Image: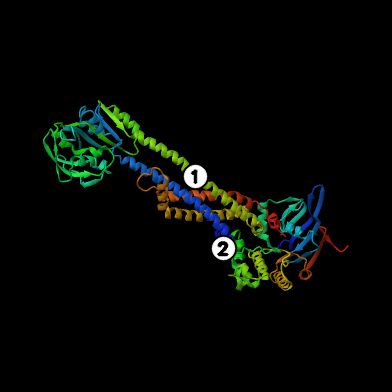
Amino acid sequence: MNEKNGVAIEASNLSKIYHRGSESIAAVDDVTLSVKDGEYVAFIGPSGSGKTTLINILGCLDNPTSGRLVLAGRKIVDNGENLSEGKLTKIRREIFGYVFQKFYLIPTLTVLENVMLPFTFYKKPGADGDVDRVLKLLGIDHRKNHLPGQISGGEMQRVAIARALVNKPTILLADEPTGNLDTKRSKEIGEILRDLNEKVGLTIILVTHNPSLAGMAHRVIELRDGKIYDGK
Amino acid sequence: MINIFQVAYKNLLRKKSRSGLTIIGIALAAWVLVSLLGFNRGYESALNKDIDNLGFQMLVTAKGCPYEAATLMLKGGTGLRYMKEEIADIVRKEPEVDEVTPMLMQATFDPNKGESGGYNAYLGVDPNTFPKMKSFLEFKQGKWFTEPEAYETVMGYEAAELEQREAGDMLLIPEKNVELKVVGVLKRTGTQDDGTIFLPLKAVQKIFGMKDELTGIGIKVKKEADINKFEEKMYKLPDVQVVSLSQVKQTIMTLVSTAKVMVFSIALIAILIAVVGVINTILMSVMERLQEIGILKSMGATAWDIFKLIWLETLILCVTGGIFGTALAIATAKATEVLIRQLLPYAPSGGLVQISFALVILTFGVVILIGLISGIYPSWRAGRIRPLEAIRSQVE
């Protein structure tokens, strides 16, 4: 929790402009938003509306062209001036956990090894004691010695979520986490995300095309042409 | 807890056949390296041994004295020149000298030899030093004389044939009316030793009345000594001439050096092929795993972490290949030797392929270096990828 002001993400006038020849395309266009600690926010919108670009900028995976971004009281981007890649790496590993549409599990590592993979590069103090709890929380503790090829798609996404959680992030970014799953598995993942938010207090930013998944969030923000669409 | 080594190792298991083929490539390079360097070393030392087996590499004789029995015969057994035995002591004290053997050659006319008579050459040798220096001489019968003044003889193969003598027979020295006991007959050597009758030095000096006189001194020079410098030193002795094998040895060694350059060139080519193979494999593996590398970076892996991971994968491949290659080289050393013997017009006796512990260590060093060098570029490429570019790279 950010005890200073209870704001996890504060973005002002964020834009991301791509140039193609003489043409300029704004993938994110002057977005201002704020996410409170412990909030569950879902971004929806048609393909090409800028959802993924926005979540990547908020998650320090991409740099905006202009604007200001503050994460847990730390200034990340100011007037389009970005931090160095080294500093961004530190912020990514301290603040975020990422879940993507594809699971990106290493096929030759067991479920447990995949979940513990982040520790190879960085371990938050006391984080390793949490592994069993995370595996149980996601209902995959009985699968921990299986290889990814031996488990279902839903279980694979749970492993990916567990991997994102082992280093105790304060914000979980999930980009189309159910995009590769059927309705039943999607519902299960949705419930897991809701539980993580409600029971663990994790701040969650979600990008989805799935209305029922978005419906579980506290707040749904619709994007159109890179802008926040307010129905007008 | 999983560590970076396990991750690297398990990554390589994902494409077993590709990793396997790369390991085979490196193993072959290591095999070529060990075998060629082992051959280079073995060949040189076997050749050195053969040259050393010629006995002494240098002969000091009194000025004008014939130093081969054949010359002596051509001169009708005359023309021998002498030097004092003390010269042998002077030579022995030189630091370059390993061993010295004094000799006295004499000849007698034997009217019963052949149709119109002929000369017999007697070589008085020191029973302590001569047999050691000519250790390659093998006996058909008997052995060397042991007593320094015994009236005994060892006959060269042809001399024994001509005189029709065997070990245990007696041999008369014509003109001197002295009988010698034949204690040994040598096997054929193809050198002038075949026609020589060997006696203890003191016996020859006594029989021919040549006390303290020598016709030649055989010198074995230490391996590390500069033969040319030593030769010059010998020329400074009064009234002596020097006959040296050093030129011959140097010529052979120059040839060996030329062969060495070829051997190293082939080894270098093998190494270059291995390096290119490894770079190709690792680069392909990096390109295929771009998204995954992006995910690792999003987990908090730094550029250096990714560099280490990919570098470690390269090293694992190279070290495994190195182990297999070296084992293969050791296992096939005998077969390689047989093959080389068939291919070479002249192969010295003794082991042609010598694989030592130092050579194995050297090969590992080279193979690890191959890994370190060939891993740099793919690792650097992987390390500098920005996470988002990597994640986006193949998104359908």
Q: Position of residue A78 (x, y in %)?
A: 75, 52
In the rendered image, which quarter is residue A6 located in? bottom right
Q: How crowded is the residue under tag 2: few (<14 C-alpha within 10 Å), some, or many (20+)?
A: some
Under circle 1, the secondary element is: helix
Per the rendering, the mark at residue B255 is none
Judging from the image, what secondary structure is the residue with disc 2 in? loop
Q: Quadrant of the C terminus of chain B?
A: bottom right
Up-down relation of residue B378 to residue B114 (above or below): below
Side of B172 where A46 appears, left or right: right
Image position of B158 with respect to A198: above or below? above
Residue A94 falls in which quadrant of the image?
A: bottom right
Whole-number angstrom distance, CA of label 2 to CA of label 1 = 41 Å
On the rendered structure, is A199 left or right of B89?
Answer: right
Residue identifier under label 2: B2
The residue labelled by disc 1 is B266
> Around disc 1, counting alpha carbons within 10 Å, would you say few (fewer than 14), some (14 to 19), or many (20 or more)?
some
Dot 2 amino acid type: Ile
Q: Are marks 2 and 1 in contact (CB under 8 Å)?
A: no
Regarding residue A124, the answer to whether it shows in the image is no
- Is residue B277 something that shows in the picture? yes
Q: Quadrant of residue B195?
A: top left
Q: Residue B316, relative to residue B44: is it above or below?
A: below
Residue closer to the observer: A166 or A27: A27
Q: Residue at x 46, y 43 (%)?
A: B263
Looking at the picture, do discs 2 and 1 lie on one chain?
Answer: yes
Tell me residue B357's x, y (percent): 41, 51
**Which quadrant: the N terminus of chain B?**
bottom right
In this picture, residue B92 sits left or right of residue B348: left
Q: What is the chain identity of the residue bearing mark 1?
A: B
